[in-house]
Each structure stands twice: as structure tokens, then as C-alpha cells.
Amino acid sequence: MRTLRTLGAAGAAALLTASAATAAPSPPPAPRPQLTDAAVGRAVAALDGSIAGKMRRTGVPGVAVAVVHNGEVVYLKGFGLRRTGESAKVDPDTVFQLASVSKPVSSTVIAGALADPGDWDKPLAGSLAGFALKDPWVTSHVTPADLFSHRSGLPDHAGDLLEDLGYDRAYILDHLREEPLTPFRASYAYTNFGLTAAAEAVARGQGVSWQKLSEDTLFKPAGMTRTSTEFDAYAKAPDRAWGHVRNPDGTWSPRYVRDADAQTPAGGASSTARDMSRWLRLHLDTGSLDGKRIVPADALARTYQPEIVAQAVTGRGTPQFYGLGWNVSYDDAGRLRLSHSGGFALGVNSNVTMLPLERLGIVVLTNGAPVGLADSVALDFFDTAQYGKPTTDWLPLVAASYAQTFSVGRSETDYAHPPAGAKPARDSAAYTGTYDNPYYGKATVTAAGDGALTLSLGPKPMRFPLTHYDGDTFSFETTGENAVGRTGVFFTDGKLRVEYLDENHLGTFTRQ
């Protein structure tokens, strides 16, 4: 029997080539489009009822939806009110905050701005002044792709609590170096300010602001005339959807206004259903719009590639990945599915979903805090196109997922009810003073004439009245996008620890 050794290098290569040619199985056929115009038309026809029914079930005040198929906008409508208590209706040109749907919009901007798709993989290497991570080696190697795909090692939502306390983008990016890191490029954690750092670095590399880069690269060329990355543009829009939160009685109120300028590339964009339909058309035509090339096809395709496993399975049991600003998955037919949701607990929920092979996409914008409406409208739509009807009642499933997400970080202690036999607090002088923390900055505890304590945090600062619980333990009610109800404050040996700020062991302040 001949061996590779006796054949020599050239003979071995020839033998292996011949063997591969005869023995290798044929590759599976590429996935093919499955949805006919009639199937898509059936799904479009069902949208009015789907949206109206979900608005009745949830009470969400306003919704705008756009659908694109084969380069055409086949559905574009607004429903409900811009603001409860007023008569102005939502229409296709009503401006909504996008929340995290800003991320795929931002990755589109960068795809158009970078000279080569490979530039996503070039280390930032000090290109963004003030930005560093805890490990110097990671700082020197981290790339825009790492930060846009949430695989830098930064912990989940790193920096968001600093934003809630009123710190600006520069302070937050400068203090991410205090955050502990998980293994680089081997762990996924959704991080708004990591992505923001990458976008800012790219913009500064082009010598412009993020807003100007977005306008010049995408918004103006694509005719997205009502789209902006600045909160001020949204706040001053005459046709604007106000964010709403649900009251205990099930009604909705516009109680908060969410300014997300600190994390603009990750969550601060605003747009309309009409503008977003143009953005969908661009994606579904490989970067072209109305016959004009806006983003190179290969650059756009790079944003669709899986970069890291985001979760083991989707709701349908298939693997879920994260690309560059996109959730990436593949259905049973092998078709690429791209999606992203956006949500502010203070009053916004949005969803974009696309099947590029089918040249089909939907965007759903709402002015209510996340209760499942935006995502379930999209899920119903694609189910109806594929199967003729929804395969399940998605609304309660998505609502439960959001409820679970927003419950994370809540204390296990019921601070509203002190324990029987609670120890009294010491004199207020034992607690008052200034405390310092390398991440959260200064904390000040002051006492009123009656001895009532107030904790001040952040640059403005924000003031939180403290309620006594037991001994040297107090509590206060958290506020902002990441509020988690009542949280504990513990005084021990000249230190102050704030429970909800301490998830990554950064919440202890030392008395000065």
C-alpha cells in the first residue's frame, strides 16, 4: 500500500486533491426565497387588525409602522395619539425616539464611513481621548467590532448608572476603566457606552461630530430628513410622540422625558416611520436607494455577520448571535434574520426586523414603555407571511421577557417594612459628611434640623431622602431609566455602600 511518505510531497498533494474531489460531499444548496407577493400581501392586510388589537390589550397610546418589500414601501401608517390628553394623532411623519434601534442605524453610518470593512477590526489604540479599559492589553487591542458586538469584556450595561446620576458622555467614557472585565472576545454583555465609545472614536477619526458623520454619511444621502442623533431635535419636533409609562390603574401618562444624548450612538437617535422605511429600503437593496449607492454592499454585509453568541437560543429555539449593531439568527430554511428592539423604561419601545433574502422588513415605533407591542407586531407579521397566521400569541411572551429584564437589580429586602425589633439609628453626625468613590464620584450626606438624612449623588447633584430601616441601614427610592425601586444604603466603619450601585463591587464610598 502506498503511503504519503513514499509518494513525496507533490504526489501526496495530488492524491489528497483527487481524494477530496471524489469523496467530499456536495455543499448544501443555498437558501432560496420562499415568500410570494401574495403571502406578503396577506401579512400586510392583517397588520391593521394586529396593531389595533394589541393597542387595545396594552393601552399603548401611539404606534407607527412601515413595511418594505422588494424595494417598495407597502405599508406606512400611524395609529393613536402622540400624547395622551391631547388630540394630535400619530402619522408616518411623527418623530419617535428609537432607543436601541439606534444601534443598527449607527452601524449603518459606520459601514458607510469606513474606507474598508476590515477597518472594523483595527484597534482604537488611543484614538478616543480619555477612553480606556481596566486591562491595558485589552485597551490596546479593542476594536470597533469588539465594542459594537458587546464582546469587549465590559459588564452588562456598564456606565448606564452613571448616566442616570447625570454624568455626561466624557465622564462616563473616562470612567469605564474602573469596570471589571470578563474574558475579552469570549463573553457577551450588552453595553451601551462601549458601543458609544467606538462610534465616537470613528467620528473623531473623520474629524467630525457623531451627528455630522451621521448626517453626511446616511441621513442626507438617504433623504431621512426628520432623523437625528440629538435629543434637542426630537424635543423641538412639532410632530413628536411623547414617551408614556403605564400607571397602576392601566392608563398611560407622559410622566418622563428621556434625554439619551450621553449614549447617542447606542440609544439616542430619533426618526419617523417614513424615514425608517427609507433606511429599510437601503438595507434590503444592499446599500443602494433610488438607484444611488449610499453604503458599499460589502461594508453593509459585514454588519450582518455573527460576531459572538448573544444567547443560546431565540424564542424559536435557534441560536442567537450578535453582529455589528444587529441581532443575527438563521431560521430553519437557512435564511438570515436581522432584528433589534429598543426600549426605554421611561416610555419608548421599538423594533426592526428584516429577512434580507426575501427583501422584506418591518419597523414598529411606539410611545409606550416596553410591554411587548412592538416586538409582537413584528413577530406576528413574519409568522403570517410564512405560515398564514401567527404561530402563537407573542404579546404575553414578549411582555413577560421585558418584565423579567426590568426586574433585574431589585433588592430582595423590603425596605418599606422594617423588621420587628429594628435597632435605632445613631445620631445624624455619625453619618453626615462627604464620601468619595473613584467611579461614582462624590457622595454627600446631610441632615436637616430634625435629623432627617439626605444622600446627594452625581454632578448636579441628585438628592435622595434616606429612610431609616435598621441600625446603620437606610434606604431611598431610585429614579431614572434604570430605577429598581427602593434600595439599601449601608454605613460601616467610615464607608457608605449603595446597594443598587454595587452590582460590580463599585458602590462603596469612603468618608473624607
Image (cartoon, rainbow, N blue to C red):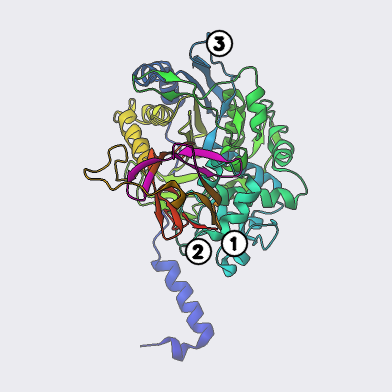
- Gap in Å between the C-alphas at discs 1 and 3? 47 Å
Disc 1 element: loop
Q: Nearer the viewer, residue 201 or 225?
A: 201
Image quadrant assignment for residue 237? top right
On the image, the x and y values in percent for residue 488 come to 38, 46
Q: Can see residue 411? A: yes
Q: Are marks 1 and 2 in contact (CB under 8 Å)?
A: yes
Disc 3 element: loop
Q: Do the residues labelled 3 and 2 touch (CB within 8 Å)?
A: no
Of labels 1 and 2, earlier in sequence is 1
Q: In this view, does 36 lie above or below 146?
A: above
Residue position for label 1:
142
Image quarter where the N terminus lies is bottom left
Q: Residue 107 carries which label?
A: none
On the image, the x and y values in percent for residue 416 come to 31, 37
Q: Residue 184 carries which label?
A: 2
Image quarter where the C terminus lies is bottom right
- Gap in Å between the C-alphas at discs 3 and 2? 49 Å
Task: Kindly identify the amino acid type of the residue bearing the numbered disc 3.
Answer: Ala
Q: What stretch is highlighted in magenta?
A: 446-474
Disc 2 element: loop
Residue position for label 3:
88
Q: Nearer the viewer, residue 248 or 320?
A: 248
Would you say 469 lies left or right of 232 here? left
Task: Kindly identify the amino acid type of the residue bearing the numbered disc 2.
Answer: Phe
On the image, the x and y values in percent for residue 493 come to 42, 61
On the image, the x and y values in percent for residue 310 come to 42, 51
Q: Which residue of the protein is positioned furthest toward the right in this rendering?
A: 207
Q: Do the residues labelled 1 and 3 touch (CB within 8 Å)?
A: no
Task: Kindly identify the amino acid type of the residue bearing the numbered disc 1.
Answer: Val
Of labels 1 and 3, earlier in sequence is 3
